[in-house]
Each structure stands twice: as structure tokens, then as C-alpha cells.
Image (spheres, rainbow, N blue to C red):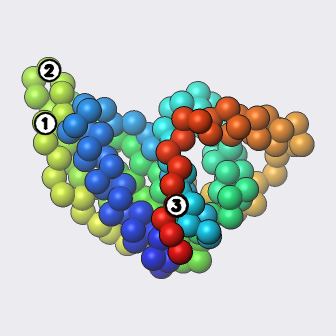
Amino acid sequence: MHLFSENLAVEISAYYRNLALGHGVVPKVFTLVSGQGDQFLFFIDDLQMEKEEEDQFLAYIVKEHDAVSYARGTLVIVDKSQQYIEFAVVDSDDEDVIVCSAELTRDMDDKPIGLTEFDKTIVKKNSIIFGGLFEPVKVSEAKIEDFESLWDEMKPKILHRSMGI
């Protein structure tokens, strides 16, 4: 597994802890790291797309930035009293994926008040729903232009930094 993937798992754990406990929100998050060490992070909900188009867009971004790893996270609600923040870190060169999960506790007003440590599990890439973003995706030239335009619009709002090589 690439070192960026291991670091990404640690960072996303801290990021979600800060968002949930510090700001009271648990958004769907997507982040990738390019081979040059550039990291991009944004909220998936901001895309406002249907699932299939969202997956195509994310695969396009992964390809365009020569990603070596990406992570995707969300809130999983089993019932009102049982909620988890889960994310997976997928590496381009590895069939194994890092899956992390932490239980979220809320108060009577539905405000996040506790988050367990993230448990880390290694699973096979083909066992998770969004493990295939490194696979080639076929989209029309018009759709690629739409994706390029959307990415240009999103850039000012995206967290972008260099992880260093």
C-alpha cells in the first residue's frame, strides 16, 4: 500500500473528528492524492448529481489528476441511536483497501457529542461499492467538457495542498 494511502487514513480520521465534534456536521467527503503529492478534498453533496453521474465525475477526477489513492467517506445511520462515520482509502496499486469506522454519539438535540476511535480494517477492493474509480469510464465528449467546467467552478472551494513527495 502506498504511503499516501496510510497517511490519508490518519488524516481523514482527524478531519471527520473535527467536522463532527467541532462543527456538528458529517458530510460525504471525497479526497484524492496525485502522484506528485497534491491533495484535493471536497464535499460530495456539493456536486448535486445522481449516483451514476457522481461516480463518473469522481472517476474522471481520479484519472485527470493521476491519483495514486483516494478516500470516500459518509455517515451511516443504522437507526437514530446507532450511527457511524465510515470511509475507505483506495490505492491504485493495491487490491487491499483501508476501511475505517467510528461510532458517533448524539445528544437529545441530535448534536454530535462523541466519536469512538476509528477502527481500521483491510478488505479487498472489489468488496466495496466505490472501489472502482481507477477503472476506465466511458463518457461522451460533451460530458467530459461538463466535468471540466464543473471542476473549474469547484476549484476555489476545494481544499488543495501538497503532501510532499
Q: CA distance from mark 3 to mark 2?
A: 38 Å
Under mark 3, the amino acid is Ser
Report whether residue 99 is seen. Answer: no
Residue at 43% from the left image edge and 59% from the top image edge = 88
Q: Which secondary structure, mark 1?
A: strand
> Quarter of the image holding residue 149?
top right
Under mark 2, the amino acid is Asp
What label sits on residue 95 in the rendered view? none
Q: CA distance from mark 3 to mark 1?
A: 32 Å
Q: Which secondary structure, mark 2?
A: loop
What label sits on residue 109 in the rendered view? 2
What label sits on residue 113 in the rendered view? 1
Residue at 15% from the left image edge and 33% from the top image edge = 106
Report the residue marked by disc 3: 162
Which of the pair 104/19 is nearer the observer?
A: 19
In the image, residue 115 above or below residue 112: below
Which of the pair 159/113 is nearer the observer?
A: 159
